[in-house]
Image (tube, coloured by chain):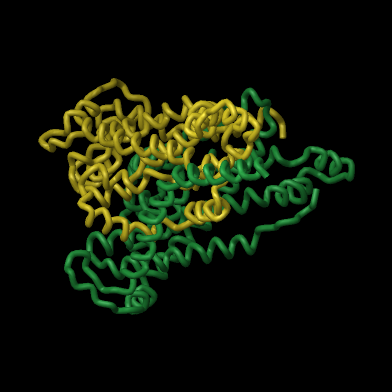
Amino acid sequence: MRNNLVGRKRATQKNLVGYLFCSPFIFFTLVMWIYPFLWGIIISFKKWNLISPRQTWVWFNNYLGVLKDPLLWLMVRNSIYFMVVFITLTTITSLGLALLIKQIPKKYAGFYITGFLLSYVSSGVAYSMVFNLLFAGDGLVNNFLKTVGLKVDWFINPRIAMASIALIVCWKFTGYYGLFFLAGLNNINPTLYEAAVIDGANAWQRFIKITVPLLNATFVMIIVFATITSFNLFTEPYMITNGGPMNATRTMMLEIYHRVFALLQAGYGSALAVVSAIITFAFVWGFRKLIERDDLYDA
Amino acid sequence: MKMPLIYLVLTTGLFLSIFPYLWMVLSSFKVSGEIFTRFWPSKLTLSNYAFILQGGTGQERNFVGSIVNSLIITIIPTISVVFFGMLTAYALRRLKVRGYRYFENIIIYQMLFPGVLFLIPLFLMMRDWGMINNYSGMILRYLIDPWAIFIYIQFFKTIPESLLEAARIDGASEIKIITRIMLPLSKTTTAIVILFTFMARWGEFLWPLIVNKNYDKMPLSVLLALFTKGEYKTYPGVQMAGATLLTLPIVVLFLVFRRYFEEGISFTGLKG
């Protein structure tokens, strides 16, 4: 009885201290998440130039405007183009990296991992500046290609500009995603491979039947990250192409920035932000439906 | 695959991965005529750095000041994120306040929520609160990071309760338990939080671009970006000196913390 009472008193005290510790977070969530989230939705139903006290309700007009604008579909197409190139490239490079590093002795692996991760820590502004010069018309890469009689207009040709940006973003993420793949590979039970070898499976069969399915969680995570990156692209196109040539690298983030902070169309920009969030969610959801597997090979 | 071939492929990849850095640093010491024509400079010059650190000819833009600004808007959120991350995670996971599972769900939603939705309303809030063009506007929204709380929760799960009970019986307050027991135990987690937060804030571009138009308060990333697109367009050497200054601190920090990086990735994994 007495013990019970003491226990309850302790529990109340714990709760009290706990809520005290949590209160900054709760306050922060209310002020910096819930309030702006609701406000952002409300603005998207209004016509407002950010300055004047007059905010007219226009209900779904902003959304209609966003959906009717052919630029939206061009931007979605650009992002999908980026996504396809980026996901394909980085999956190959980072999974390849992980598979190779897995083969070498641990003491050398650390050296390579550190080296490959260096590109990940570079900031968007800095590496955009570097690649902008490296890939320039008379830049080092083209000077090198000239020796084999080639010249590529990396950021100038509208058909490949987005792919070029995907290439440099791939440069940034290869080591980082590779580390996730490596962690995934290390979680695979080696006896599975031994059993497969006894059953006469060759290296390719082992890769397709064991490695790929058991890396499912890693694939899902990386594809979700990459999808979000694709639709949130801002710094690289802002620094290198400014959305050009001929809108080939215009992204929804660039357009939101332009609409709100240059044209002062707060309502339209907010509606576009909501649409962009919904499109991102739809793709993330779709990809997960498509590739996520819960109970493959219950091992 | 044969071992020598593996090393060949890895080393080629490593070279491609490091090459842009190498070229950036070399170019920052070249005279402008040699940047596009030579890989190894025939002579080294410090004029690019002198140019940028003296604020350019007649531009009077304070790049030294912008480095200080970058440090301010990086270090304050980093300390705050660690502090509140531990405090909140401790309350949720160790004290298990009533409804802690709901809070943990909220935190996961916050991590996955698209940031684009907050950009405009947060800007308007900063404006209405008079925080445009000063540090507080650039810092405030980053003082607490749900991601940091999440990874502290993941780590705190692994600490046995008996350890804390023993401390409580000895009369230690909860704050003392955090600083004396949890903090030393969570070295790896804290290193990861510091590294990622520092990286994210130091390289931050869009948010400070929006909430600050005052050149004297601009972080290095924004000032450099505006100048690269503007007055420094035709000064590749100066651009590369700036890019080197922007890259150096995070590379150094990463090399110092790299041990924790690899250790931590397996259990913290959630950062896009």
Could you tell whether B222 is left or right of B115 in the image? left
| Residue farthest front in this picture | A2
For residue A89, above or below residue A243: above
Q: Residue at x 55, y 55 (%)?
A: B102
Which of these two is toward me, A39 or B195?
A39
State which quadrant residue B71 falls in: top left
Please tell me in which quadrant of the rendered image residue A68 appears: bottom left
Q: Is residue A281 visible?
A: yes
What tint does the image give chain B? yellow
Q: Is residue A34 above or below residue B185?
A: below
Q: Which chain is green?
A: A
Q: Residue at x 84, y 44 (%)?
A: A196
Residue at 48 percent across and 42 percent down: it is: A17
Instruction: Indicate left or right for B215 with B154 as reference.
Output: left
Instruction: Tell me where residue A207 appears, x and y as whole percent.
Output: 74, 46
**Observer-nearest residue: A288 or B108?**
B108
Image location (x, y in percent) of residue B64 = 22, 30
Image quarter (top left, top right, bottom left or bottom right) of the N terminus of chain B: top right
Whether residue B118 sits left or right of residue B271 in the image: it is left
User: Where does residue A240 sit, x and y in percent of width and height?
Assistant: 33, 49
From the viewer's side, name the closer residue of A214 and B34.
Answer: A214
Residue at the farthest right position: A199
Q: Residue furthest left?
A: B58
* In the foreground, A206 or B219: B219
* In the rendered image, the vertical position of residue B164 relative to residue A212, given as above or below: above
Residue A109, percent from left and from top: 62, 28
Residue pictured at 74% horizontal, 41% vertical: A188
